[in-house]
Amino acid sequence: MALIETHGLEDPISEAGKGYWSGVGSRLIRDPVTMICLGVILLLILSAVFAPYLGLADPYTGSMIKRLAPIGTEGHILGTDEQGRDMLARLIYGGRLTLFIGLMPVVLAFFIGGALGIVAGYLGGWVNTVIMRTVDVFFAFPSVLLAIAISGALGAGILNSLVSLTIVFIPPITRVAEAVTSGVRSLDYIDAARASGANALTVIRVHVIGNVLSPIFVYATSLTSVCMILAAGLSFLGIGVRPPEPEWGLMLNTLRSAIYINPWLSALPGLMIFITSLCLNLLSDGVRSAMNVKD
Amino acid sequence: MKHFKKGVATLLVAASLCAQGAWAQGTLRVGMTAADIPLTTGQTDQGGEGMRFMGYTVYDSLIEWDLTSADKPSALIPGLATAWSVDDADKTKWTFTLREGVTYHDGSPFTAADVVWNFDKLLDETSEQYDSRQAAQGKSRIPAVASYTAIDDYTLEIITKTPDATLPYQLAWILISSPAQFEAVGKDWEAFAASPSGTGPWKLETFVPRERAELVPNTAYWDETRIPKLDKMVLIPLPEPNARAAALLSGQVDWIEAPAPDTIPAMTGNGFVISSNAYPHNWTWHLSRTEGSPWNDIRVRQAANLAVDREGMSALLGGLMIPAKGFLPPSSQWFGTPTFDVRYDPEAAKALLAEAGYSLENPLKVKALISPSGSGQMLPLPMNEYLQQNLAQVGIDVEFVVVEWNQMINLWRAGAEDPSVEGAMSINFTYFIQDPFTGLIRHLSCDLIAPNGTNWGHYCDPEMQGLFDQIKNTFDAEEQDAVMRATHEKYVNDALFLMVTHDVAPRALAPNVKGFVQAQNWYQNFSSITME
Amino acid sequence: MHVMARDLIYLRTATVFTYFLRRVILMLPVAFGVSVICFMLVQIAPGDPLTAIMPVDATADEQAAMRAIYGLDKPLPVQYAIWIGNLFQGDMGKSIATGRPVADEVFGAVQNSLLLAFSAAVIAFPIGIFLGFLAGYFRDTLLDRAVTAISIAGVSVPNYWLGIVLVIIFSVNLGWLPSMGAGPGGSQDWAWDWLHMRHLVLPAVTLAVVPIGIVARTVRALAGDLLTQDFVTALYAKGMSRGDVLRHVARNAAATALSVMGLQLGYLLGGSILIETVFNWPGSGFLLSNAIFQRDLPLLQGTILVLALFFVAMNLIVDVAQAAIDPRIKRS
């Protein structure tokens, strides 16, 4: 389940410019699979954001008498969970937390790891050594192990999961950022900019970021599905989101014994994780090929 | 859906047939809830389950619980001691007559010197057999014991710190390991753990840490009626409830402890038998009685007790619970006849709350400590959420402070006044309530106020304290039972806890497991079981 | 001609060996960092590790005595120094929850995890390579799309969920395969017969799903790339048969494929924790989750350390092997 690779980024310098981006856009639109996946993800995000306005049942209160109602029950289209709470409402509200702790760590790691990698790659020298050797140490742990170890040590909780997953995804992003930045750094026009006396920050801001951001971004998108599965896995183990919050991994866990009463019902949260992660992967592939990043 | 179950049924029959073929007749494989094989050296860990499967099976104590009847609460019976009495003049001096002709699994004879040796194992840090692991489990169980002497091979004298009539109950905790075996394995408890020796009805044959332990009958056991009929009993740790259920349903084990309620229909539907019985366990909210706690008002306490729809909660647990009528289970020999009837009566609850100055519009707001898991906690989250709904309907607005089980234990030790409880006014902590001390005294005694003891709520009441003293000073068993009943009546009449339910220790057995009698106790007798 | 070849081999071996040495030396600070992280991890943990072993109503004095026995009353750097000092003597301390030596617990469990990881690899790698090669060779055909779909699905499936579903179908519903454990007599009397190996089937298959996807994707990309490269066209132009060309391509792809698979093996070992929990497999992941829930510090430290160091060593082996196979790889 761990998929953190740094391959496929041999040509970091993308031909930045309007023409390039409109080309990427039109290639994306002509790719039906990617567009469908984008649609699914957007739908999930929108329904999660606007969940309170969708006229759903309360995802926190249920009725014991109506517990584990099958899919298709009147009033509960997707049935009810082990505490009689509406499954549809819990799956949609669950999307909030699941997507949040599934995507947020990658976003955070994109900024933190990206910044670290660019600084390391641009400045080189001992700064590079300090940053990259520290990253190496964290990179020495398999991602699942590191996430579980940190979460296990910190204990359950949304914030703790966020922290542990962010720590897991910073090292690979830093590595990629460092690699592409060192590549860009040696280019003539950056040398020229440096020679003209511009300070490091300005050079990074003006010249480097524009060139390295898209490969780092493409790489980061490929991590989102791993992160989501991992985040849900932490909750599934009991060291992620705490009950009674709706979250797909946790729902999968609490519905485990219901598998003997209503197998389809208990499969729903797992199915949601699967579909979302599938779409994230396909979307990332689509973006990658639209941006002409080598696979 | 029906299709699914039918499929399960036919294939399970096939599976269990295969399973039988692969195994010798008369092997019982048990799926435990513990994550590891309990400590095998004598004094077990892993709580009640450890004592049940690795304590009273391989070892004996001086005084034991009668585990032969399912119909009445179990009482103390002679074990390695055949008789005991307290000195008429000096109520701290006890004399025990020990059983003759008992041998350990290693063949060495059991004598009074061995009991002294075993006490030293737990209490004397300078003795060569002192074992910090066993001491951690056993020392706190015998707070009364001051000193002990072997008068002759079969007479033992114990001096208590103060007169304490609950000593026999305390001694029921202490398991006797073989000094000769300890000597033989080089005075090393780790080596002893691999080949332990006690006097119990079962001998530990092999054990693989975290995976399995195999027990075989001790055919030379001193109580012939308790020589096991099985060829072998295999203990397998299966902490995950669904892994336990799957193992039973796929024929990998014949018996599981604590099946999850939702897995029970699939089991009964396929001929598996659910065994359950009352036993001394309760599921309550231990209330804070510190200054400013709303629970100091008896009307609020009684109102909360009347607000709980215990029958409704039963649905959640698949009927596997006994609605609380008091702190002890209704069938307890110490239940008595309390005047406050613990029942579901929301109107009466509202009336009491109105007297206390609360209403639906102006609800009492209170914080409560709960944990999403924990040993003996049943299904803490759904049950507490259900309770929260019940209480909200009469005007008690509960906010939960949810902490992990290990943290919960620390907060329970710290007590209600500790800042770490974050202002919570109750703790949902289930109790082992099998004897006078664990059942009643330890929760409310003035000298055990947390963090120096187990009185979490800082309750201290002279009348209650008087009753506790009386329990300790009543040496006649029947009279002591009467005082116990009076004490419990006060527990209930004053509504000192939010009394919700009792667990019934469900276990699921394959159809071919016969002869098991589930005693009303934390421990069980496995000797009568046969496999067909 | 002969002499030249021998010299080349000698040179290659020497270079690989120096490379290996350099990598080992570079590995040392990483290993040190790993040990510090392992040690610190459990220090940031809230809760008291002694909770697991003391009866709930043990007194404060009894707890303090126990804390002293386990050295938990000493300052952190001292605890670390003691821990690392003992480590070098092969002593990883004793588990707080069980009292058994951590080294025994961890190495026993790692063996079981390795068994599971290798079994999963044996299932995953050939299938992944086959599928990937098929897709890469028949690029942009229906077959390619099918393989891509399978591999993306494999990478996207939460395998802990898949495990539960497989147990329901094959253990509970059909009764074909056992749902838990490492054999009828536990892992100690493991044997390579069906009675034991059937316990491996479900966890190994579940664990294999993700690497099948990853290996298939990698091999597809490699094969696709190589087949379109100039030298392949040149080989065809030279009149080489289809089979010979394929062999060439395979050799060229081997180095990269090997590195991906080596890494995957490491991930299988570290990532099997969820699967081991689902199947009650007595491996390192199962041990780890027990250690987490019992707050068993020495055991937690030991397990993470051993797994991480194993992963580090795995990376080293992969890099060196890659360098040995593919002379084009020159590392700075």
Image: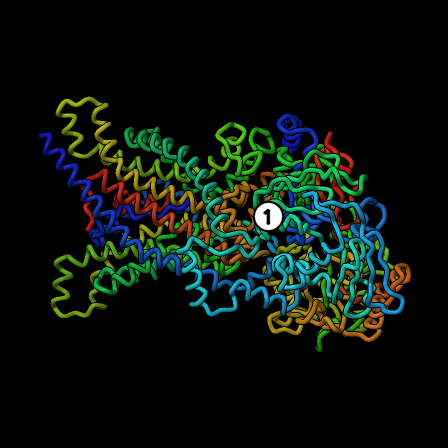
Q: Is residue B56 left or right of residue C315?
A: right
Q: Is residue B371 visible?
A: no
As rendered, which of A156 and B302 lies closer to the eye?
A156
The image quadrant that residue B510 belongs to is: top right
Q: Is residue A34 visible?
A: yes
Q: From the image, which quarter does the N terminus of chain C lie in?
A: top left
Q: Position of residue A42 (x, y in %)?
A: 43, 50
Q: Is residue A22 left or right of residue C166?
A: left
Q: Position of residue B341 (x, y in %)?
A: 86, 61
- Can you identify the residue that label 1 sits on? B185
Above/below status of A187 relative to A3: below
Above/below status of B14 relative to B239: above
Q: Position of residue C23 (x, y in %)?
A: 26, 50
Question: How many marks overall?
Answer: 1
For image coordinates 77% across by 38% down, the residue present is: B528
Q: Which amino acid, mark 1? A: Val
Q: Position of residue B411 (x, y in %)?
A: 63, 66
Above/below status of C135 relative to C290: above
Name the chain under label 1: B
Label 1 packing within 10 angstroms: few (<14), some (14-19), many (20+): some
For image coordinates 21% across by 39% down, the residue present is: C326
Above/below status of C273 relative to B478: above
Q: Secondary structure at mark 1?
A: loop
Q: Is residue B350 left or right of residue A107?
A: right
The image quadrant that residue B159 belongs to is: bottom right
As rendered, which of B101 and B320 lies closer to the eye?
B101
Question: In the image as oriented, which residue stretches furthest toward the bottom?
Answer: B291
